[in-house]
Image (spheres, rainbow, N blue to C red):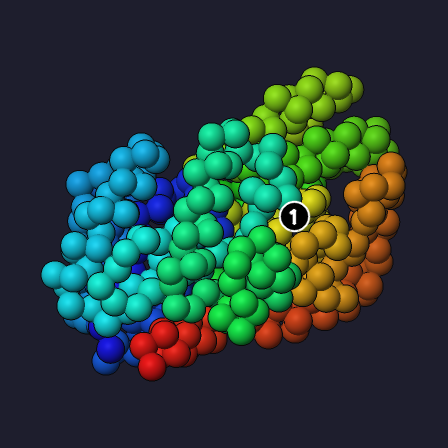
Amino acid sequence: MDIGVNTLFMIPGEVGGTETYLRQTLLEMAARFPAVGLVLFTNLENHDVLSADLAAFKQVRCVRLNVRARNRVARIVREQVELPVRVRASGVEVLWSPGYTAPRFCPCPQVVTIPDMQYKTHPEDLTRMARVVTDFLVRSAARHSRRLIAISEFSRSEIVKYTAAGREKVDVVPLAASQEFSNPLPLERRNQLLSSLLPPGKPFFLTVASSYPHKNLPALVRAFGAVINSLPHTLVMVGNEGLGETEVRKALAALPDAARVVRLRNLSREALVALYQGCDAFVFPSLYEGFGLPVLEAMTAGVPVITTRCGSIPEVGGDGVVYFDPQCPGSLAASLVDVIGWSAADRHRKVQNARELAGRFSWAATAAQTLDVFNKAVT
């Protein structure tokens, strides 16, 4: 089978978990299924990155469209008009669009991944025009694709609720954490990386999320402020600025010691792994997730995770994480103090349980299940 992959949505370093999903699934699919041809339709921002990722695989080729995804209007037009022409010329048997949207007309069967319906439940994450356009494109993709992929049972229920798709048309294919999070960095190298990013010798809490309103980062900052005088920790926030940045900055300005917060972005994978493995606890206060990949990454890295029961997170975290109630003032601050107070034996037992739970997910399984969906689409 020859599979076309619509990567026009992907801007390296800017689309969060969907970039990880795309790149890891493609790597596993190329490595494990050499008889499957992959034709990637790329943009000007991601062509070199994806070409380098998959350079070792002869069954993969990249077809670059002359468009930048940052110009969203141009990208949408090219996706709807030029991409079907390129698909026809390539001769692929199915087109997979992993990033919410897909061409309305296509010469072959289509599969689209809709990771979540966040724009419906948290409209404040987008401008009004972006919400209208997104809704039209997602509904169109759901209608005109033969199969839909959801990344969790929660995500599938959201897709069924907010589009006209029947439940039987939607397949659940979970994501996974990369092996690099579970492979311990040499202590000297980890300390070297951390000392280049953080105040030396200071324990820290970590969160990885862009500042969109649903990520609930102001609540984390306020909770940190409530314990800042009783714990020696720094709060490390990794992620890009989103539409909730103003509220995050207000919360930071109210801290008694704003220097105890370090904000980072555009990190290397090795530096990110060092942060996960070196933190005292990972905190993910999100109010909505289609999957919750950072939770799984932290579980795999072997650190305690504090998070919510919102969206799909309980599907990922199970009983391997600490849940707080985002509606209860003081709940997150109490969880921070509680986790830091664990004995060494309790911490070891709990993070080992979390690691075992995280082992249920793998990119190899994601790739194999995704290929099964493609086979359904063409039969």
Quarter in which the N terminus is drawn? bottom left
Q: Where residue 139 sits in the image (x, y, percent)?
A: 46, 52
Residue 23, can we see it? no
Few, some or many residues within 10 Å of mark 1 (<14, 14–19, 20+): many
Query: At numbered mark 1, what does the secondary structure look like: helix, strand or loop?
Result: loop
Q: Residue at x 59, y 74 (%)?
A: 360
Q: Residue at x 27, y 47 (%)?
A: 80
Query: Is 141 positioned to the left or the right of 279 in the image?
Result: left
The quarter holding residue 252 reads top right
Q: Residue at x 67, y 65 (%)?
A: 315
Q: Nearer the viewer, residue 66 or 161?
A: 161
Query: Is 105 positioned to the left or the right of 133 in the image?
Result: left
Task: Determine whether 45 is above or below 23 in the image.
Answer: above
Q: Where residue 116 sits in the image (x, y, percent)?
A: 55, 53
Q: Nearer the viewer, residue 110 or 5?
A: 110
Task: Determine whether 37 is above or below 330 in the image.
Answer: below
Query: Is 34 positioned to the left or the right of 199 in the image?
Result: left
Residue 106, can we see it? yes
The quarter holding residue 121 reads top right
Q: Where residue 365 sits in the image (x, y, percent)?
A: 47, 75
Q: Amino acid at mark 1?
A: Tyr
Query: Is 108 positioned to the left or the right of 371 in the image?
Result: left
Q: Nearer the viewer, residue 61 or 145?
A: 145
Quarter in which the C terminus is drawn? bottom left
Q: Where residue 167 sits in the image (x, y, percent)?
A: 56, 69
Q: Residue at x 34, y 35 (%)?
A: 72
Residue at the spot of label 1 = 288
The quarter holding residue 286 reads top right
